[in-house]
């Protein structure tokens, strides 16, 4: 028996039952909006003045850029003035120290050099003695060595700065 014969032997369907179901209807409640479209006949279209290309600032972006450049220029000028003022103070202190060291007599400058040398040797001896004591007790560590090296470096920097002024002062005197 064929499929068609088997289907024909079954109960009969009404034409409504045999028909395919109707697709659902979509009812549109919205109308198409044309408000965002530009109509050339309306006054919303803007025109450009005839002297547009001759203007210094043609857009808001250019105006913002000009404002940023002006602010940066003012900041550079203020930084230059602050640097110039600070260097004037440093120069004044430099000339004061140079003048003070140049006014020292030979005996006073020699005493100053001997005093500095004695202080450096004394400080080094004291730090070495303390480090040896820590080593013998087994408490000498990197932290202690770093602190001692920092103290010696600080004294060396101070000696170098004041030694430079002493040298300048003696150079001016001769």
Image (cartoon, rainbow, N blue to C red):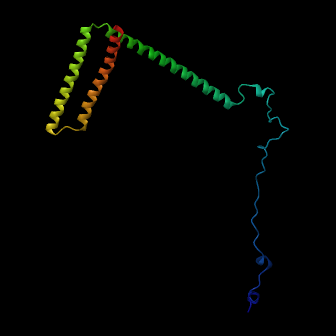
Among the 4 quarters of the image, the one containing residue 127: top left
Indicate left or right for 32 with 88 as reference: right
Return the residue found at the far bottom.
Answer: 1
Judging depth in this view, the residue of 21 and 165 nearest the camera is: 165
Quadrant where the C terminus sits is top left
User: Looking at the picture, how far across and down is residue 147, in whole percent?
Assistant: 26, 32
67 is higher (above) or lower (below) than 115: below
Question: How many labels sit on residues?
Answer: 0
Among the 4 quarters of the image, the one containing residue 130: top left
**What residue appears at the point 79 percent right and 44 percent down from the top-left corner?**
37
**What residue appears at the point 57 percent right and 25 percent down from the top-left corner?**
72
Among the 4 quarters of the image, the one containing residue 42: top right
68 is higher (above) or lower (below) than 139: above
Judging depth in this view, the residue of 75 and 160 nearest the camera is: 160
Indicate left or right for 13 with 77 as reference: right
**What residue appears at the point 18 percent right and 33 percent down from the top-left corner?**
131
Return the residue found at the far front.
Answer: 174
Indicate left or right for 147 with 66 as reference: left
User: Looking at the picture, how far across and down is residue 118, in whole percent?
Assistant: 20, 19
User: Looking at the picture, how far across and down is residue 49, in whole percent?
Assistant: 80, 28
74 is higher (above) or lower (below) than 13: above
Judging depth in this view, the residue of 29 and 119 nearest the camera is: 119
Indicate left or right for 66 with 124 as reference: right
User: Looking at the picture, how far across and down is residue 4, in whole percent?
Assistant: 76, 87
Judging depth in this view, the residue of 172 and 71 nearest the camera is: 172
Quadrant where the N terminus sits is bottom right
């Amino acid at each position: 028996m064929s499929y068609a014969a088997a289907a024909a032997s079954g109960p009969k369907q009404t034409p409504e039952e045999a028909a395919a179901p109707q697709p659902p209807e979509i009812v549109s409640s919205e109308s198409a909006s044309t408000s965002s479209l530009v109509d050339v006949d309306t006054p919303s279209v803007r025109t450009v003045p005839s002297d547009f290309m001759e203007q210094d600032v043609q857009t808001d972006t250019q105006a913002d850029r000009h404002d940023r450049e002006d602010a940066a220029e003012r900041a550079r000028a203020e930084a230059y003035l602050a640097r110039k003022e600070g260097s004037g103070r440093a120069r004044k202190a430099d000339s004061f120290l140079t003048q003070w060291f140049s006014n020292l007599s030979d005996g006073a400058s020699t005493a100053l050099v001997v005093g500095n040398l004695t202080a450096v040797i004394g400080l080094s001896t004291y730090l070495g003695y303390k480090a040896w004591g820590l080593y013998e007790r087994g408490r000498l560590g990197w932290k202690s060595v770093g602190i001692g090296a920092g103290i010696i470096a600080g004294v060396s920097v101070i000696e170098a700065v004041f030694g430079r002024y002493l040298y300048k002062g003696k150079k001016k005197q001769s």
